[in-house]
Amino acid sequence: MDDLKKRLIIKAGCIEMCEAIAWGSDSAIMREAAARITKLEDARIAELEAHITLRDHFAGQALEGLIATWDGFKSEQDLAEGAFKMADAMLTERRGKANE
């Protein structure tokens, strides 16, 4: 999506600078499309963030580390399971520290 937005904005700029197509109406449409794409992306991110738990967040962080050291011999399912096991361990540790 970012690539599409960038291309729309660049094309709109070229039209504004280089061509006189319908007094810039084509470039305005492209800028409006890019703005709408951005708005939709922002709304989708906000929606996802509203449903992500702390466990999901920790698992995502753990998954980054697992993927960075992935040797290709484990399946994607094994990676996902390992990430959530690490997340559960982090939550357990966090609860233990909160009780001290």
Image: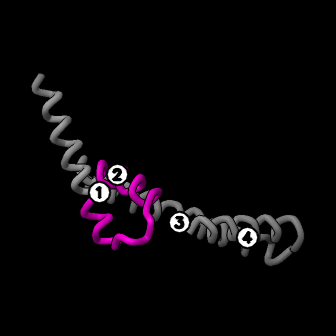
Amino acid at dot 4: Ser
Mark 1 touches mark 4? (CB < 8 Å): no
Amino acid at dot 3: Arg
Closer to the camera: disc 1 or disc 3?
1
Query: Which residue in the protein does label 3 denote?
Result: 36
Q: Residue at x 32, y 64 (%)?
A: 79
Mark 2 touches mark 4? (CB < 8 Å): no
Q: Residue at x 36, y 57 (%)?
A: 63
* Residue 72 highlighted magenta (yes or no): yes
Question: For residue 18, which quarter of the picture?
Answer: bottom right
Closer to the camera: disc 1 or disc 4?
1
Q: Which mark is residue 27?
A: 4
Mark 2 touches mark 1? (CB < 8 Å): yes
The CA span between labels 2 and 1 is 5 Å
Left or right placement of residue 71 versus residue 99 in this view: right
Looking at marks 2 and 3 on the same chain, the residue that comes earlier in the sequence is marked by: 3
